[in-house]
């Protein structure tokens, strides 16, 4: 929703309600990332009006303090950043015990291997494909080898863990993400910058499915 019109969030959410699987909410605090977006009060308001589950991506300095509150408010997924969490295992467990799915995100320069032992605590691993903080950035192909390693790591672990990519995902780049093993795709500008956001989601899903060889993905706006 980072690329949506923030003054019309409920309308923008409704525009993709029939086609996107989740609404991806980028929470930024002006500390972990320089940008400031929306926080818990707006997420709580949107939860009352949005038909789709909310996928909350917390780009904040103190996820240990705040993540469980997003879960308790009703977010379907709550993702914290590995670089920001002081006690990721405890926080991931608190997210799950509050009734949400727990996600762990890594920035482009952060390796995933140190988190292999945490996979049992996760429902989703988010590999950032831009440096977090702003929408509309160009996709970083240099992250694709890490997406492949993440897919192998998840396959070795064996549990059901989604592999999400976020940043610069467009009609042109989504196929490379799917081919590398991602199965959840966050698209902002590619959806809300389009004339018809719902049609844009359909086209993105189709491109991902072709690249993944017919497996279905879960794009979110
Ligand atoms: Zn995000």
Image (spheres, rainbow, N blue to C red):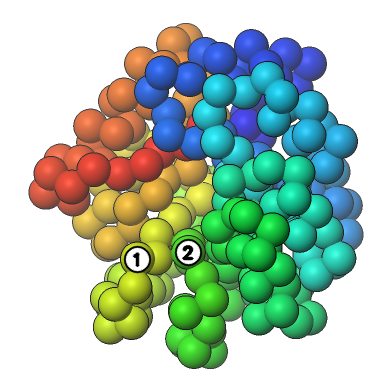
The residue at 48%/62% (across/down) is: 124
User: Which one is in front, 132 or 103?
Assistant: 103
Q: Position of residue 116 (x, y in %)?
A: 46, 86
Quadrant for residue 81, please give it. bottom right
Q: Position of residue 28 (x, y in %)?
A: 78, 49
Judged left or right of residue 29, residue 152 is left
Whether tag 2 and tag 1 are in contact, CB under 8 A, the answer is yes
Q: Earlier in the sequence, mark 2 or mark 1?
A: 2
Residue 134 visible in the picture: no
Residue at the extreme left: 213
Compared to 69, does 195 lie above or below?
Answer: above
Q: How many marks?
A: 2
Q: Secondary structure at mark 1?
A: loop
Q: In the image, 45: left or right of 216?
A: right
Q: Secondary structure at mark 2?
A: loop
Rounded to the nearest whole Å, what is the CA distance between mark 2 and mark 1? 7 Å
Up/down of 123 relative to 58, above or below: below
Q: Which residue is mark 2?
A: 123
**Which mark is on residue 89?**
none
Classify the position of the N terminus by image quarter: top right
Q: Position of residue 18 (x, y in %)?
A: 41, 18
* Label 1 crowd (10 A; few <14 / some 14-19 / many >=20): few
Is there any visible trace of residue 23 in the rendered image? yes
Q: Taking 84 as reference, is 52 above or below it?
A: above
Residue behind mark 1: 160
Residue at image x 18%, y 47%? 215
Q: Closest to the observer: 70 or 139?
A: 70
């Amino acid at each position: 929703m980072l690329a949506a019109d923030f003054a019309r969030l409920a309308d923008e959410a409704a525009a993709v309600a029939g086609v996107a699987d989740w609404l991806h909410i980028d929470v930024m605090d002006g500390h972990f990332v320089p940008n400031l977006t929306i926080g818990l009060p707006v997420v709580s308001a949107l939860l009352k009006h949005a038909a789709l589950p909310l996928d909350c991506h917390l780009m904040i300095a103190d996820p240990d303090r705040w993540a469980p509150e997003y879960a308790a408010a009703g977010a379907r997924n709550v993702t914290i950043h590995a670089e920001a969490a002081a006690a990721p295992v405890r926080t991931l467990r608190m997210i799950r015990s509050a009734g949400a799915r727990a996600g762990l995100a890594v920035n482009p320069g952060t390796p995933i291997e140190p988190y292999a032992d945490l996979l049992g605590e996760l429902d989703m691993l988010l590999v950032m494909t831009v440096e977090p903080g702003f929408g509309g950035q160009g996709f970083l192909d240099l992250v694709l080898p890490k997406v492949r390693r993440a897919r192998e790591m998840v396959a070795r672990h064996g549990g059901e863990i989604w592999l999400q990519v976020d940043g610069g995902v467009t009609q042109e780049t989504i196929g490379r993400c799917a081919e590398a093993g991602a199965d959840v795709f966050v698209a902002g500008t590619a959806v809300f910058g389009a004339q018809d956001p719902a049609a844009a989601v359909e086209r993105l899903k189709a491109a991902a499915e072709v690249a993944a060889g017919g497996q279905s993905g879960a794009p979110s706006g």
